[in-house]
Amino acid sequence: LRVSFSVIQKESGLIDGVIAVLYDITEQEKIEQERREFVANVSHELRTPLTTMRSYLEALADGAWKDDEIAPQFLNVTQTETERMIRLVNDLLQLSKLDRTEYRINKDFVNFTVFFDKIIDRFEMTKSQHVSFVRNIPKEALFVEIDTDKITQVLDNIISNALKYSPEGGKVTFTIDKLSSDIQIRIKDEGVGIPKESVNKIFDRFYRVDKARTRKLGGTGLGLAIAKEMILAHGGDIWAQSVEGQGTTVFFTIPYNPEQEDEWE
Ligand code: ADP
């Protein structure tokens, strides 16, 4: 809080009054600090793969390229790091689009139960681990107004996390609940879980519970931040619950108006 005083004085020199102005700089300063942190984070995230690549390329240039065994390994590292940087830059571009005030979403009326089922099918077809899928999805049609590309990405980010942090043989449960004015989607895993103090932070940009581990798993730390922006743009909400060592559930809601459905039947 900043305060400035002005004294009102009459020509005679008598003081007539005082004006005090209070400026609330806390909000503005918070935004500015977040911006600084964001730039620092981006720089750090880009520097890490770049310095890794530099040392591997130096080693190759110094003669490692002649070694039939080492050279392909070193090239593989530089390839992995390049891919990580591409993912990171793509995520950053996504976020910067979402930050623009003129940002618009292209909504369509979609039967969410069918839409959700198809996305789960795709993961079931391509998943590489032994994780079983359980679906608690109502048979009835649930029409909602969504930007299908955006919600596909939200689900991709949440489901790939659920798989990433699941143990072999784990179970991932997909649920849709119809509430009074929205539908609630839940994706529950039996993975490593998240410490209590971190559960609310996982939707922050670049927040990771375990930097080293998630970097190994190829994460950018932006997936859930993007998901959050997209859900908020739909007028929904997103949050998580977790018990360390037992698993995590990510919830989100999408506004739902049961009366609107009649028009579409
Ligand atoms: P990342 O690209 O690192 O996965 P996200 O924004 O998707 O970034 O997630 C942020 C962090 O939240 C992850 O690094 C991880 O620590 C934690 N997290 C997200 N989903 C889960 C989950 N299902 N189980 C355990 N931890 C999770």
Image: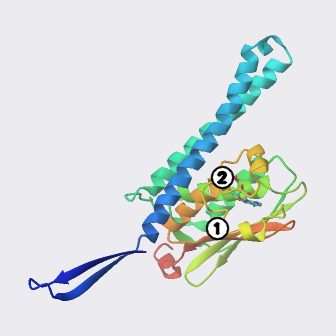
Q: Amino acid at mark 1?
A: Thr
Label 2 vs label 1, nearer the camera: 2
Please tell me how crowded label 2 is: few (under 14), some (14-19), or many (20+) other residues with Cα within 10 Å.
Answer: many
Disc 1 under 8 Å from ligand 1? The reply is: no
In the picture of the structure, the residue carrying the numbered disc 2 is 221
Please tell me how crowded label 1 is: few (under 14), some (14-19), or many (20+) other residues with Cα within 10 Å.
Answer: some
Residue lying at 65% horizontally and 70% vertically, measured from the top left: 239
Viewer-closest of 107 and 43: 43
In the image, is residue 208 above or below residue 233? above
Residue lying at 57% horizontally and 67% vertically, measured from the top left: 111
Disc 2 under 8 Å from ligand 1? The reply is: yes
Relative image position of residue 9 (x, y in whole percent)? 16, 83
Residue lying at 78% horizontally and 52% vertically, measured from the top left: 164
Viewer-closest of 4 and 117: 4
Lower sequence index among marks 2 and 1: 1
In the picture of the structure, the residue carrying the numbered disc 1 is 113
